[in-house]
Amino acid sequence: MIRRLKRSVLALAVCLAVPAAMAADPVRIGIPVGLSGANSVVAPSVVQSAELAAEEINAKGGILGRPIVLEVADDGSGAAGAQKAFDSLLFQKKVDTLISMETSAARNAGLPIVSRGKKPYIYTSLYEGRSCNKYLYCNAPVPEQMVAPIVDQFMKKFGAKTFFLVGSDYAFGRGMLKFTREYIEKNGGKVVGDEYAPMDATDWTAIISKMRSSAPDAIVMSTAGGAPNVTLTKQFKAAGLKAHIGNLSVDEGTAKSMGADAEGTYITASYLTTLDSPKAKEFMAAMQKKFGANLKTPNDLSVPQYDAIYLYKAAVEKAGSFDSDAIIKALAEVSFDGPRGKVQMSKQRHAPLNMYLGQVQKDGSVKVIETFNNVDPGEQCPNLK
Amino acid sequence: MIATLLDIVTSAAILYAVAAGLLIVFGVMKIINFAHGGFLTIGGYSALAVTKLGWNPWASLVFATGIGFVAGMIIERLVVKPLYSRPLDAILATWGLGIIIGQLITIAFGREVQFVQSPMSGAIEFAGASYSSYRLVLVLAATVIGVGIAALLQKTRLGLVTRAVIMNEDLARGLGINSGLVRFFTFSLGAALASLAGALITPLSSVDPNMGVPWLVNAFMLVLVSGVSFMSLLVATVVFGGAQVLVSTYVSPVLGGLTIVVAAAVLMRVRPQGFSRE
């Protein structure tokens, strides 16, 4: 007993004596992401992007001398899984920040936990916009940056007048299509159908029937990223309908897995593999070198993840500490010149971005149709300072 | 109009293919096999394996049926048979079994959603409407399954024996029928049918380790209202499948997903014997 007591005292003393060693403690970056469920189609590419960023930063001495350790947790692509993932990352793994691409359902469920955990959270997925929280930043596109190129292409170039909107029944699908509807109506177009299926729906029969009976000129899709996109596109293709297709939630990686079924679909993205800036090429080469044959196609949902880790690094270095408030202030002020060009989350927690209108080709690659430089995200969080 | 009608027929066909295996096990064993969703998942992943091996997608139907049958045989011997005298425990065991199958598949194939190559794509002109050709093939498949089961039960010695066990197991045993063997065969057949159904539905959607669960719930409801008759199962799938399509089309797909469960509950309240004649 006494001996054990002695030993614990000794252990305690050792613990107290190591703050010097604490400096080399890793920076833990929590990545709650949909390894199962709808997002599981893109999640591996997101994790790969993060791994490359961490490796590059660690090779150059980490963040303020501390190496990065990634803590990946499955959020199940939904609210219930996200609560568990955020909780365990923030309170058990004690992560220093959360940086992740997720569904809006998962983000919304996680935000109250982030508020309790008081750590910066960079959301790296394109989304419906107007998610505002003291700890939240987003470096990916919002409707103001995504909708106009597709709708303009259909209305001005193809003379489309009637639109059918279809999405997943949650914040993202509804938010994105509400914006789309307003934009179409403002420009004199008509929305002839506006339908939603549950987030995990695999059967789109009824909605495709409605499309058939309303015979729209163009269809805009906005499902949860990944699996629902593929099932909707496949079943739409099988139904043999003719219309221009725009998709607000398909990324290049998912487009690849759909192959010929997605041919002709218009998308908007802030990153495409065909970008030929030196930074984009450098990034692609590094990804290919690191992952070789296992590389998942980098895409508009995974590249912001890479950027965000660098943005976090820059913010910590500017703040000069790991103090949450200081980092949050600095996040708006720092920028990162990466594969998507220079990204700075300077506009109400969101970032002006270079956007591309692309069209999916037969082999799943995306051809750039038009480029829009430095598109403003608009009024996102006017009440957050 | 034609398209809606086709939607109803094809949806009913899919439901029939999914529920048939559950019904035959229920008829003989008087237990709802909650591992049915698991067997369906096994079928989906058999189709995925065929895609990955680069075989002809049609081969997945034969492959999935075979895998399902073998899995059914093993599971009947190891898990279900020792529990024949304890039906409630057997139901619980099949529930657990469904979870175990899901986990094993997660370990083997990963937890992410994956996609199976479709044996045919595109649409064909049918009765004046262009319609998904694969969904029409499903109607054919469901018909083959239905006719096959009917022929098995009505025209073969095995079917005769099986019907005897369904009607009165004690009496059948008294007459020298090996009811254990009948149970063994039907459970394996049920598993094979579930697995085949899994392989049939995946080209339309996607596979993930929990893909069987929503189908299990609908199949369970259909079996509850069908008694043990394949004729009433046919009626039930057409009526409920039709209701599902109509609600999804004219009200909302979100409510459409609930239609079968709600309609079955209401039907059981109004007419406890459901669609069966007794």
Image (cartoon, rainbow, N blue to C red):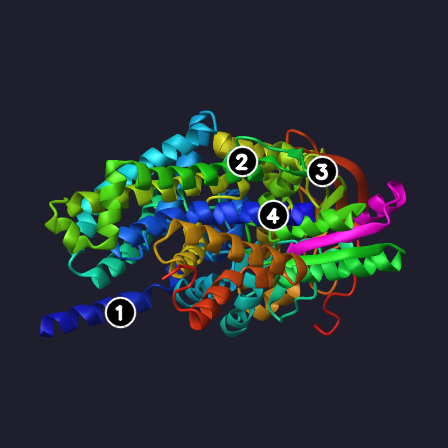
**Pointer 4 chain:** B
Task: Tell me the distance, in whole angstroms, between the alpha carbons under discs 1 and 2.
Answer: 74 Å
Q: Which amino acid does label 1 sit on?
A: Ala
Q: Which of A182 and A231 is in front in this view?
A: A231
Please name the residue that numbered disc 3 is placed on.
Answer: B128
Query: Mark 3 — on which chain does it sit?
Result: B
Work out whether mark 4 precedes mark 2 in sequence or the reverse, and give the earlier one: 4
Front residue of B162/A311: it is B162
At label 3, the amino acid type is: Gly
Q: Residue B137 carries which label?
A: 2
Please rate how many residues cluster around mark 4, counting C-alpha atoms within 10 Å: few if below 14, some from 14 to 19, many from 20.
Answer: many
Q: Which amino acid type is marked by label 2? A: Val
Where, by quadrant of the figure, is residue A187 drawn? Answer: bottom right
Q: Can residue B277 be seen in this view?
A: yes
Q: Do labels 1 and 4 share a chain?
A: no
- Between the C-alphas of marks 4 and 3, the distance is 14 Å
Q: Residue B7 carries which label?
A: 4
In three-dimensional space, the C-alpha distance between marks 2 and 3, rounded to whole angstroms, equals 17 Å
Q: Are marks 3 and 1 in contact (CB under 8 Å)?
A: no
Instruction: Report whether B103 appears left or right of A72.
Output: left
- Determine whether, in the image, residue A105 is placed left or right of residue B214: right
Mark whose residue sits in front, 1 or 2 = 2
Please report, as a chain letter, where disc 1 is located. Answer: A
Q: Which residue lies furthest to the top in this view?
A: B55
**Mark 1 vs mark 4: in front:** 4
Q: What stretch is highlighted in magenta?
A: A147-167
From the image, tell me which residue sits under label 1: A13
Dot placed on the residue nearer the N-terminal end, 4 or 3? 4
